[in-house]
Amino acid sequence: MNLKQTLLALIIAVTVVSCKSTAVKETAIKQSKKEIVAIIDKVNNHWQETHSELGNAFWNVAAYHTGNMEAYKVTKNKKYLDYSNAWAEKNQWMGAKSQNKSEWKYNYGETDKHVLFGDWQICFQTYIDLYNFTGKKEAYKIARAREVMEYQMSTAANDYWWWVDGLYMVMPVMTKLYKVTGNEMYLEKLHSYLSHANSIMYDDEEKLYFRDAKYIYPKHKSANGKKDFWARGDGWIFAGYAKIIQDLPKNAKHRQEYINRYKDMAKSLAAAQQKEGYWTRSILDPEHAPGPETSGTAFFTYGYLWGINNGILDKKTYLPVVEKSWNYLTNVALQANGAVGYVQPIGEKAIPGQVVDKNSTADFGVGAFLLAASEMYRFVE
């Protein structure tokens, strides 16, 4: 073979490889609606069959139910609806149960006095959804949600959301109750509380959120001296923005402000994604706590897909991000038996040396996976 023939052969070989690579990329998300439903069913049936004890209304269990509600919306599987309904009834359609408003608190707490603490309010998201599914005839399902949130809004305080998780827990409660009641106060207080949260946790340079005031740089640094943004924490708020923007009227006063921040986060997060598709627990310092983590990755995947599906995020820019994260979620995180692995346990930061492996699972991680899968169903639809 002469030089000319050799060069021609090389060009052909490179072209073939390039075409194959392009084909793989183009078909990275070519699952049918039926195949996505099969993934949702595999995950959700496994969770519900292994968790017949319904649990309390605290944040971790309630976060699962926010995903279960989305799974119900796309599959119409009544079993999912019944599971959340039974959980809501077990918890009397309440979060923390104190009836004495003078003792209600919103610092961290797992007692019935912590009625105003957002980790006890996330359950209201599911109660409102269940109320809406029943044709809005059963007001008792949202009576406690309205009592608690309307009392909270009657106070002068605006520092209710002092940790980033709380933004996912309660922001959607505000917009959901606004849609039910038409009370503009929900949107006004949402902005007031979020403005306070931004003032203490948002990093305007990186366009990401610290978990809370304890983790502000340079007071706190990652193992390598970098800003330490916790993946699940930023997952909570990124998903939270997607949830509130979809519920806001098109002419809502602060809607564009929220969209701008959501788009800024999308850009920052895309730059930090690992080539394997996941985000490490400390977003900007992969060496701090290396390896895959599912809860943050699933929340990000949901957030990106929602933005793409609704024309807010550019498909050409962000679909490659989703292709990689969805591949991770379905081929690494999802186990053969339907369990969702690599979920960092309950905590508030990336912990060097903490074991997070295929056996690491949790209710909130499954909920995040179901959010992502349900939005993927809408994408392929």
Image: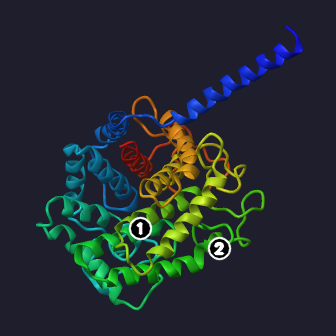
Q: Considering the image in quadrants, where does the C terminus appear?
A: top left
Which secondary structure lies at badge 2? loop
Residue 245 appears left or right of 99: right
Q: Is residue 330 above or below residue 76?
A: above
Q: How crowded is mark 2: few (under 14 residues within 10 Å), some or many (20 or more)?
A: few
Residue 207 appears left or right of 7: left
> Farthest residue in the right direction?
3
Task: Report the residue at 55% width, 70% height from top.
Answer: 261
Q: As shown in the figure, which amino acid type bears the numbered disc 1?
A: Ile
Q: Is residue 62 visible?
A: yes
Which picture quadrant has residue 41? top left
The residue where tag 1 is placed is 245
The front one of 292 and 36 is 36
Q: How far apart are marks 2 and 1 (CA)?
A: 20 Å
Q: Position of residue 47 (x, y in %)?
A: 34, 41
> Farthest residue in the left direction?
137
Which picture quadrant has residue 271? bottom right
Q: In this view, does 211 lie above or below 347?
A: below
Q: Where is residue 270 in the image (x, y as percent from the top left)?
A: 61, 54
Q: Is residue 311 above or below residue 40?
A: below
The residue where tag 2 is placed is 204
The answer to the question of whether label 2 and label 1 lie on touching residues, with beta carbons closer than 8 A, is no
Q: Where is residue 312 in the image (x, y as percent from the top left)?
A: 48, 61
Residue 6 appears left or right of 209: right
